[in-house]
Amino acid sequence: MIDIKTINEIISQHGFPLYLYEEDVISKQAAILKEALPGFDIYYSIKTNPYKDICRFMSQQGFGADAASANEVIKAHEAGFASKNILYSSPGKTAEDIINTLDKGVIVADSYNELAMINEICAKQGKRAAVGLRINPAFYINMDSPPQVLAGIPSKFGVDEESLLLNKSFIDNLKAIEITGIHVYLRSQLLDDKVLYNYFKRVFELAEFCITQMNWDLSFIDFGGGFGIPYTKNDQTINWMTLQPQIQALIDSQRVVSKNKVRLIVESGRFLVGAAGIFLTKIVDVKESRGQKFVVVHGGLNGFLRPALMNAFNQIAPGKIDKPLEPLFTAMNAFEPSIPANAGKALELVSVVGNLCTSMDLLAKDVYLPNPRIGDIVCINNAGAYSFTLSPYDFASHPRPREIYINKKGEAV
Ligand SMILES: Cc1ncc(COP(=O)(O)O)c(C=O)c1O
């Protein structure tokens, strides 16, 4: 982790609040994923953190880009990803989105209407496009303990697996497009290797169905991913030691892999960048009210929304929100404030609040911090994924948090 001297220098140079992203951490996570899944192409989910240096790092790793909007397709290009390594998958694309991205990546259609729309646009332009199709599979991962695979559920994402055969002739008649890939994504923040293995197995079965029953000549299978990270002390890390050989054996047993030159793709966001981000801000006031101590910082809810949402959910139903509501809520205590410069000093029970005119502007409730005083720098961990991008930083016209990237040499760029 980055040292206090560097943190002080960065804050005095760039002000506060700000997000720091550490390449060193991202690089270690990338190495773990590459080693764990050698048979797969890894696609970085840009929506997790679209910061330019992070995207550039991912393209330099040889990763592809998982883009969730037409603008993310453009960002992926700017970061150096080649068109053939960009997948554009999201519900609700417009004709404009499709026209603007047709030559810039592979579009994954999210509905039969979208397939028809892409076909019409291609026909008008005298083109034939290879496209993917997102499928809502006939299974679902339920994370209630013990985690289990259940029958599929209604979803706004993709087309239902059961509807594929019924729509086969409709799809076959779309002469300006060809379905060459499938995309599945069910859950985020998966930590259980058994759940992940079953998920991969099911997606392979679905791909086999698409090849044999739908007669699609698949060139890619996008498994999604959902690889999680430990946010709280109770979270385990994914047991790659167990999972890696199991997945490899699964790949080796697949006809689809041996027969066709099919690319196996996984998408990952938070696993790569979640722990690489730190949110930094300064204490601007310390006050007491009726026996409680408040530490006031700049950039509370507006600077880093997720800790404030976590506390808001807990206010609505104290102790009862145990299901993740990704990416807004992962778990209680997922984000911990600290004052590294005061480590070892006497702990005080405080709440860390922002400077907005709402009591929802609460970053941490009743936590112990070492001797918090005006001017101290507060750090919050796990700020690399769904953090800057999800925060309403323009609220109340406060200054936006800066974003600083620390490269492998420890330089802020
Ligand atoms: C389709 C899709 N791909 C990838 C991701 C990235 O998920 P994560 O950051 O958990 O890896 C998401 C997250 O919601 C998603 O919906």
Image (tube, grey):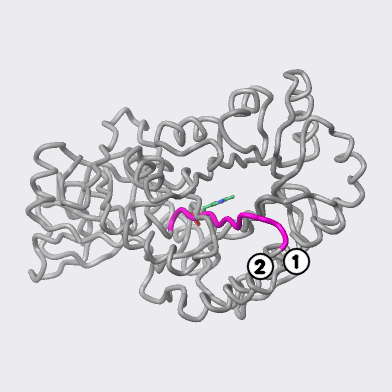
Q: Is residue 247 above or below residue 127?
A: below
Query: Label 2: how many residues lie within 10 Å, few (<14), some (14-19) or many (20+)?
Result: some
> Residue at (70%, 69%) from the top-left corner?
254
Q: Name the residue tied to disc 2.
A: 141
Nearest to the observer: residue 305 or residue 186: 186
For the residues labelled 1 and 2, say whether their Cβ atoms are less than 8 Å apart: no
Q: Which amino acid does the dot numbered 2 rest on?
A: Ile
Please state the horizontal and vertical placement of residue 272, each as a whole percent of the image.
40, 57
Please state the horizontal and vertical placement of residue 96, each as a whole percent of the image.
64, 22
Nearest to the observer: residue 368 or residue 389: 389
Q: Which amino acid does the dot numbered 1 rest on?
A: Glu
Ligand 1 within 8 Å of the CB at mark 1:
no
Position of 253 with respect to 402 (left or right) is right
Q: Which mark is residue 205?
A: 1
Please state the horizontal and vertical placement of residue 153, each as a whole percent of the image.
75, 59
What span is colored magenta in the figure? 259-270
Q: Which callout, 1 or 2, points to the residue nearer the camera?
A: 1
Please state the horizontal and vertical placement of residue 30, each as a whole percent of the image.
38, 59
